[in-house]
Image: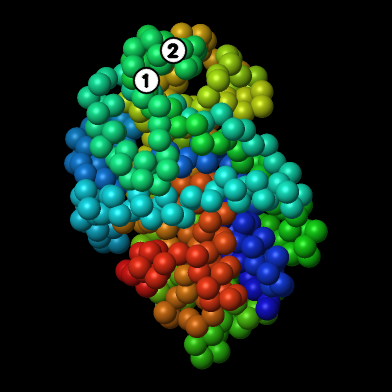
Amino acid sequence: MRTVVVGGGVVGLTTAYELAVRGHEVTVIEAERCGAGASHGNAAKIAIAESNPVPAPGVLLQGIKWMLRPDSPLSIKPSLAPGYLKFLLRMARHCNARDFESGLDLHLRLGEDANELFDEYQRQGIDFEMHDRGVLLAFETRKRFDEHCESLPALESAGHHPQHLHGDEVQEAEPALSDRIRHGLFFPADRQIEPDSLTAGLLAKLAELGVVVREHTRVKRFVRSGETVTAVVTDDAEVIRTEALVIAAGVPSGGLLGELGQRVPIYSGKGYSIDYSPAPFELRTSLTLEDARVAVTPLNGMLRLVGTMEFGSTDYSVNEIRVEAIRRAGREAFHAWRDGEGERTPWAGSRPMTPDGLPVIGRLDSVANAYVNSGHSMLGLTLAPGSARLLAELMTDGSPSLPAEQLAKVSPNRF
């Protein structure tokens, strides 16, 4: 089957791979360079232990309280745009314990095979940098530690049992941490992946499988015949015939789906990352500094810090105040921190957010042969292989590995 995948991030490329190995004749269309967006600047880890959906009890209220703080971890920019206001109102309705627990359970189901699937990618000859260091969720206060522990039953029921650390036990687990960090939860199964190497590995494998990848190419319009898409017309007037269409373009997915007659609320959640190369000090494990909401990931010769969530930002400019807040988190958490050493140019980019915090995977009601795989918020790397496999199952043999009740929760038609 001839299939066009729009989007060349990790979700689009893994989707193209899963379809290609099932016999599809795949063309990937990417508006910029493959893997250059959130797939490049993410936290560089398979974050099973941090699979919480963004809408959680108290999240938007906390964001409103932080609106006057330019360096806050969560920012909600005021806007009167009707679509944006509706998005925030929808998200507010999902900031409750029941929806949070349901969303966490779904994310755990989608990501439960992530490690095994990435192992399988490597066995199939996809070459990329991956580490098995686990993750330490680090807390300054017992209050924050206890609040986080409220979500542990769902993780433990899925087989993820963290080690509880207090006092000096935290520094014994990670000697680089300062005495400011007094509590921790260590999850041994979480891994780290250097995202650019994953993009390169997937592109090489796709070329081997005969997949055509068109970078720096934008979709101008879709050609339809009745209830099906028959072709994609690019900005250079090329007409690419297709029998199936997949939208996996991150934040722009919402606009593309609108052109297909289906409204799916996917909005930007802007984040920042800072790379330090060479790494200024060694870490045994990856960490998340929970009080500052900053992820710290060690890679080969490099250290990456990632943080902040800005709702309502529509540009990729770097806000130095927010970048300095990320630096400050590192300065306070690590006794070996030295300002400026090895720091590269900070990155800013958008993650595709949905109001219920869940991805959008499945076939559109509006078009019989059009599908979507998007809206993974900050879990794109974690959920990409499971989401790609699920969509490929739906498109090929009709026997999805996710139960019908869970499929309905990620369906694009739920909105």
Give the vertical position of 399 relative to 84 (above or below): below
Q: Position of residue 239 (x, y in %)?
A: 68, 77
Find residue 7 and report its image quarter: bottom right
The circle on residue 171 is 2
For marks 2 and 1, give the one nearer the viewer. 1
For the residues labelled 2 and 1, the Cα–Cα distance comes to: 9 Å
Q: Position of residue 46 (x, y in %)?
A: 52, 41
Find residue 220 and report its image quarter: bottom right
Q: Position of residue 391 (x, y in %)?
A: 53, 67
Q: Position of residue 235 (x, y in %)?
A: 63, 68
Q: Dot 1: what SS?
A: strand
The circle on residue 165 is 1
Q: Report the residue that reaches farthest toward the bottom.
A: 226
Q: Dot 2: what SS?
A: helix
The residue closer to the viewer here, 393 or 96, is 393
Instruction: Tell me which colouring the rendered structure shows.
Output: rainbow
- The residue positioned 43% from the left and 62% from the top of the image is 360
- The residue positioned 22% from the left and 53% from the top of the image is 98
Q: Which quarter shows the N terminus?
A: bottom right
Dot 1: few (<14), some (14–19), or many (≥20) neighbours within 10 Å?
Answer: many
Cβ–Cβ under 8 Å for marks 2 and 1: no
Point out the tag, 2 or 1, that comes first from the N-terminus. 1
Amino acid under disc 2: Gln
Q: Which quarter shows the C terminus?
A: bottom left
- The residue positioned 37% from the left and 42% from the top of the image is 155
- The residue positioned 65% from the left and 19% from the top of the image is 278
Give the vertical position of 359 relative to 70 (above or below): below
